[in-house]
Image (cartoon, helix red, strand yellow):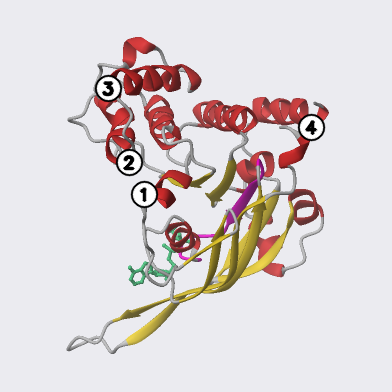
Amino acid sequence: MSTDTKGVVIVEGKDIRRDYHVGGGLFTPARTVHAVKGVSFSVEKGKTLAIVGESGCGKSTLARIITLIDPATAGDLLIEGHKIDIASAPLTPEMRRKVQIVFQNPYGSLNPRQKIGDILCEPLVINTGVKADERRDRAMTMLRKVGLGTEHYNRYPHMFSGGQRQRIAIARALMLNPSLLVLDEPVSALDLSVQAQVLNLLADLQDEFGLTYIFISHDLSVVRYIADDVMVMYFGEAVEYGSRDEVFSDPQHSYTRTLFAATPRADVESIKARLARRSAA
Ligand SMILES: Nc1ncnc2c1ncn2[C@@H]1O[C@H](COP(=O)(O)OP(=O)(O)OP(=O)(O)O)[C@@H](O)[C@H]1O
């Protein structure tokens, strides 16, 4: 990454809140679920913020707000310094280009009836005026970037393994050249060895394109190797937020310590080696 882009804030959230009003039926009294209770963060270009927490802590809700899939109840979101009206979550073509999301389940997120080439070209068809030949060239290039071959262009999703499908989902997310990628549990559905490969791929792509990641995960062993900064969420609140080294070496909140104690160490030696190489570079 060139030094002139260092320190540029790509995404900033200020006091983001999301309430859900549930119940109100004959047998269920109306109540409000405070899914996200005033969370603030910022991520610089080329960096990764990991948002960690157990099921129900609000991390997916936050991911959907940042990607403008769902509106927020209150708060501010700035993407590349531009304030977004997150109460109405306007998914404009410009925002669609800048922010992309990769979901946990590569089986569910790819249309089984579409060939891989069409899946990759679709964002260009919908959001740009790029001509067919150019779309095909870009899709072929992106297939290679994510470690697949051009021979995969005319195949269907069911012909791929889980790890390969997640590579395709990542390739699709990168077709519009976004500045921010929100990764919502991107490796949780994969075997450990495949997790390591996909995490290494994400690290390589981040280096190559200067991508900024928000990485949602419940798995601290994965977070430990991918994140620059870590936010720990607990019942909708950010109970811990700091650099990876600070959070892992000296967790301040009792919930973080409990979470650490309950997390098995996954075998991610290749990721460790990769990150050691990155920090040495
Ligand atoms: N559409 C909705 N309507 C009502 N409540 C919701 C809705 N979506 C989420 N919630 C509630 O908001 C809280 C946070 O949910 P969220 O899915 O963001 O958590 P999470 O940490 O991502 O969990 P998981 O990993 O299981 O998805 C939970 O109590 C959940 O039940």
Q: Amino acid at mark 3?
A: Ala
C-alpha span from label 2 to label 4: 36 Å
Pointers 4 and 1 in contact (C-beta within 8 Å): no
Determine contact: label 2, label 1, CB under 8 Å. Answer: yes
Which residue type carries mark 1?
Pro
Disc 2 crowd, CA 10 A, few/some/many (<14, 14-19, 20+): some
Residue nearest the viewer, comparing 100 with 219: 100
Label 2 belongs to which residue? 127
The amino acid pointed to by label 2 is Asn
Q: Looking at the rendering, which quadrant does residue 255 occupy?
A: bottom right
Is there a contact, CB below 8 Å, between mark 2 and mark 3? Answer: no
The residue wearing badge 3 is: 132
Task: Name which of mark 2 and mark 4 comes first in the sequence.
Answer: 2
Q: Which residue is mark 4?
A: 279
Q: Quadrant of the C terminus?
A: top right
For marks 2 and 3, give the CA distance.
13 Å
Against 227, residue 55 (above or below) is below
- Where is mark 1, residue-wise? 93
SS for callout 3: helix
Percent from the top left, x then y, of residue 264? 62, 45
Q: From the image, which quarter does the N terminus lie in?
A: top right
Q: Is residue 47 magenta?
A: yes
Q: Amino acid at mark 4?
A: Ser
Q: How many marks?
A: 4
Hey, which residue is sitting farthest top in the picture?
A: 151
- Is residue 6 placed above or below 233 in the rendered structure? above
Find the magenta span and give its range.
46-57
Q: Relative to residue 24, is residue 230 drawn left or right?
A: right
Quick check: which quadrant has ligand 1? bottom left
The x, y position of residue 265, in whole percent, is 65, 41
For the point 42% across and 39% down, which residue is it?
189
Q: Which residue is nearer to you in this view: 145 or 179? A: 179
